[in-house]
Image (tube, rainbow, N blue to C red):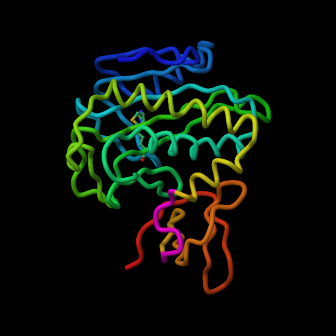
Amino acid sequence: MMPLPPFFALQHFGEIDSTSDEARRRAAAGAAEGLVIWADRQSAGRGRQGRAWQSPRGNLYCSLLLRPGKPPGEVAQLSFAAALAVCDALPGPGAPRCKWPNDVLIDGRKVAGILLESEAAGDNVAALIIGFGINLKSHPEGTATPATSLAAVGVRTTPGTVLGDLCRRFLPWYETWRERGFAPLREAWLGRAHGLGGEIRVRQGALETRGRFVDLDASGALVLETGEGRRHIPAGDVFATG
Ligand code: BTN
């Protein structure tokens, strides 16, 4: 693997419970930002909203520790930096697309998931852990959101290669966000957004809203044009209509 930029400090494990749990333990022990925990397999991989993330050998599982020192609302925008970096880092033909809030799709199927977790200190986020799960060799079947892998679309690569590219691609987005805020990320993300202009359903707990996905607002919320006007949705799961 090519050396990472000096910002990063990499720790590699054969197997671990969850790279995000390990990053959180290290954060609590005072680790500096730039720590990357990478594992070949996870025994307790976690997805968003308490879902499990199957983690067999062959795919990429890693978590990055950041200490952005900003309020939670702003820090949440880094999920878009993470999704953009994944899009940039994925090799092969065909441009990957970003699905709100933080999935990456190839041919309309989920190839990567991103999980943000943070620890607060006063009004600011003291530690942000961004977990990346990227399907390189295999993907789960029968998921609510159809999945794919790079292997399934004919691309062969290794976790180490993609990890290196992911770190190299993430850093400029992080620096851009620190220096210029969310606007440049928002613009780049909209340029790669999946389903922009189309009808979608957004589920927030038991509540489901239907409408046309028209924009991403200045905070990162999804803007939905509904029969009752525009709705700004800060968090939820997006599904196709039908
Ligand atoms: C999602 O639900 O889409 C997010 C999935 C995030 C999975 C990654 S794998 C590496 C890191 N460790 C975990 O336990 N989860 C994240």
Where residue 225 appears, as percent x and y from the top left, is 62, 78
**Closer-to-camera residue (53/38):** 38
Where residue 106 appears, as percent x and y from the top left, is 34, 54
> Does 58 appear above or below 190?
above
Q: Is residue 195 magenta?
A: yes
Q: Quadrant of ligand 1?
A: top left
**Is 93 on the left-hand or right-hand side of 63?**
left
Q: Quadrant of the C terminus?
A: bottom left
Q: Quadrant of the N terminus?
A: top left
Residue range (magenta): 192-199
> Does 118 appear above or below 143?
above
Residue shown at 23% from the left, 58% from the top: 142
Q: Residue 33 is drawn in which quadrant? A: top right
Q: Main secondary structure of the magenta part?
A: loop
Where residue 232 appears, as percent x and y from the top left, is 67, 67
Where residue 70 appears, as percent x and y from the top left, is 75, 35
Q: Is residue 57 magenta?
A: no
Residue at far bottom of view: 227
Residue shown at 28% from the left, 27% from the top: 41
Residue at far right of view: 123
Residue shown at 71% from the left, 51% from the top: 183
> Does 74 appear above or below 109?
above
Residue shown at 29% from the left, 17% from the top: 14
